[in-house]
Amino acid sequence: MAAAARSVNSPLTLIVGDEELLVARAVREVVEAARAADPDTEVVNRRPEELTENDLIDIATPSMFGGARVVVIRSAHELSDEQRDAVLGYVATPPAEVTLVVAHSGAPRNRKIVDAMKSAGATVVSAAKISRPRERLDFLTAEFRRLGARATDGAVRALADAVGGDLRELAAVCEQLVADTDGTVDERVVARFHRGRAETTGFAVADAAIAGDLPEALTTLRQALAGGTAPVLVASAVAGGLRDLARVTGTGGTSYEAARALGMPDWKVDKARRSARGWSDESLARAIRAAAGADAAVKGGAVDAAYALETLVTQVVGARESTRGSRR
């Protein structure tokens, strides 16, 4: 990702690939570099469905008030022909005070934009999906290094086995381990925090419950407990997911702006915002109260922790269903 950080010296940055975490990081690094040089840098962030004709005119026109600007166009492979042609015209003659960041999945559609930006000398950042086991191990090693920590080869392999292939989950777990560990992350540290698929399974239960999928949530919960996942980790994952919904509710601006204000990764803001669409303030409050009760239950307040978690999942899904019912 170092290439992205240098883009502030170039008017063009091209991000190729559709790995959400890597795309978000590349955009963030360009914006942060620009604001380090000029704190008043304006950021314009658009997807194809948000990109209007006026936007395209404004993007290609120097600000009448002066000052730097970063223009981010996401999902460029989905641009219409008219939008694509406008972007191609911009790439040919970008204003000096504007940095253009274009994220393209790498799909054949609108490949002309990719070719034009490369020909124009754009900084190119790869955000391709990481699917091979070796690539995941390399990502984890680099992630610990990025966080200023060191992990043994055995710890990296154990973590990849425990968590799986979701890059967002891998990054989140790395942050947790570094925050909770003094010194080198080794296999004992990974085993302590991630027996079986502890964190990932907890996240899976939380995602299904928050999405309102009761059969999936209960099935995943039973698999998690059967696999040795500690009940407290499941309760924590559900509570954490609900807190994320509460934090993003009512926030405005782009994902980057909200992430900066909330101190959350922007991919996490995007995920929480999508989930929050199915919730009302009242239903979310009900679910958070249920999570607080379950937290106490799994920490010794209940005789049967598994039953307490099944009750939590049912209550969370029921709270979400009450939102749907009130909107009919």
Image (cartoon, rainbow, N blue to C red):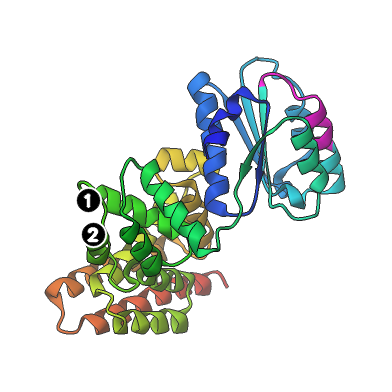
> What is the secondary structure assignment of the residue under circle 2?
helix
The front one of 265 and 250 is 265
Q: Which residue is mark 2?
A: 189
Q: Please name the residue shown 27% across and 79% down the image.
A: 228
Q: Please name the residue shown 52% across and 51% down the image.
A: 21
Where is residue 220 shown, x and y percent of the image? 40, 80
Where is residue 277 shown, x and y percent of the image? 53, 61
Say if 28 sits above or below 227 in the image. above
Residue 253 visible: no
Where is residue 160 shown, x and y percent of the image? 40, 64
**Marks 2 and 1 close (CB-CB < 8 Å):** yes
The amino acid type, in three-letter code, at marker 1 is: Thr
The front one of 24 and 125 is 125
- Quadrant for residue 297, please give it: bottom left
Q: Is residue 103 left or right of residue 109?
A: left
The residues tagged by marks 2 and 1 sit, at their Cα atoms, a distance apart of 8 Å
> In this picture, which residue range is highlighted in magenta?
86-97
Q: Which residue is mark 1?
A: 181
Q: Please name the residue shown 86% across and 47% down the image.
A: 81
Say if 110 sits above or below 195 in the image. above
Say if 26 sits above or below 203 in the image. above
Where is residue 128 shown, x and y percent of the image? 61, 53
Say if 124 sits above or below 249 in the image. above
Any magenta on residue 238?
no
